[in-house]
Amino acid sequence: MRHRLGFAGKKLLRMVLLLLGVSLAAFLLMSASPLDPLQTNVGQAALGSMSPEQVARLEEYWGVHTPPVQRYLGWLGDFLRGDMGTSLLYRAPVRQVLGERLANSLWLMVFAWIFSGILGLVLGVTAGANRGRLPDRIIRGCCLTISSTPAFWLALLLLVIFAVWLGVLPIGLSIPIGADAASVTLADRLRHAALPALTLSITGMANIALHTREKMADIMTSDYVLFARARGEPKGSIIWRHGLRNVALPALTLQFASISEIFGGSVLVEQVFSYPGLGQAAVTAGLGGDLPLLLGITVISAAIVFGGNLIADLLYGIVDPRIRRGVACT
């Protein structure tokens, strides 16, 4: 127990340092951007018609002449006190904007994370247990094709098939167009989230299936599996008792590591489907020069990814007793 607490403490400290580094990197990249927030959000024609006093007030609002060090330290101090600042584009607290957008994205990410993990594990185990045979060739070919396919292209393909040709799913957005928020049902939200979630699930499934296949193939050629076969143990029992148990740790690592892939893919997928989630808000904040919102999205997204990896490390002790006793931890 003491070993696990110390291990978790070290991981949490590393997570805090990584979040600090991520926020600093995002700030430096935003500061080095050639985009002028005034021209991007106001327009050159509108700026030309304004008085110098109005332009000066806009420059003060966007922090154009504020030294970068002062801007970052000011944001960091407010963030440590629990204040994420105010979004310059939405003119609302960053905490409120993040809460609304993250609630929309959770529909996609949770479904994609669970479905891609289960499907990737099943396909990977099936392919690895039948290495070189027809099921393996089919699964490996499909996964290689999917892993080399851009997420936005797959999103456009599914959009054309299910929304344009078949007409069974909506073409985009998170709720029906023109519908009152009070009249939107859970079924409406699920229908609008189906295509983006399916796209993220398919793209995330391929890597999990391919890695699980390699591990499962190695297990099926190991000495203890050969011994089990020599004893006459059925193939299904070998896969269940020996295969899944030994492939659990790599599958767990891949499952939690895929959180970052889902976040990255959601940026493109939400743009294709015009889905008002966290990914679309990140693109809007980056192009519009909304530094408080972009930093808030970056830190929260990184915290979720790092937190998922931490949970995976802690779950290793449950899956493998040797890790729980500190034998296999380094």
Image (tube, helix red, strand yellow):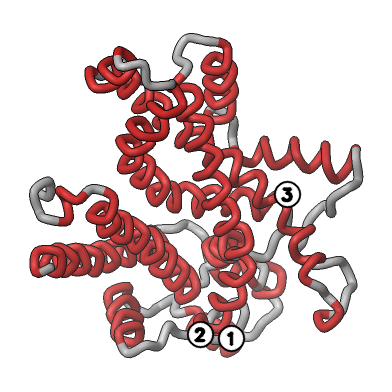
- Between 151 and 253, the one lying in front of the other is 253
Residue for badge 2: 86
- Rendering coords of residue 59 (x, y %): 50, 80
Q: Picture coordinates of residue 204 (x, y %)?
A: 52, 41
Q: Identify the residue under disc 3.
A: 195
Of pointers 1 and 3, the one earlier in the residue sequence: 1
Whether residues under marks 2 and 1 lie with C-beta atoms below 8 angstroms apart, the answer is yes
Residue 141 image point, x, y percent: 56, 18
Which residue position is annotated with label 1? 92
Question: Quick one: label 2, few (<14), some, or many (20+) residues within 10 Å?
Answer: some
Residue lying at 40% horizontally and 78% vertically, measured from the top left: 65
Q: How far apart are marks 1 and 3 (CA)?
A: 30 Å
State which quadrant residue 177 falls in: bottom right
**Distance of label 2 from label 1 (alpha carbons):** 6 Å
Residue at x 69% of width, y 42% of height = 155
Query: Would you identify the image quadrant in which residue 49 lies?
Result: bottom right
Amino acid type assigned to the residue bearing label 1 in the image = Ala
Q: Is residue 221 above or below residue 43?
A: above
Instruction: First in sequence, mark 2 or 1: give its number.
Output: 2
Quarter of the figure with the N terminus? bottom left
Where is 250 relative to 135, above or below? below
The secondary element bearing badge 1 is classed as loop
- Residue 230 position within the rendered picture, expressed as x and y whole percent measured from the top left: 30, 12
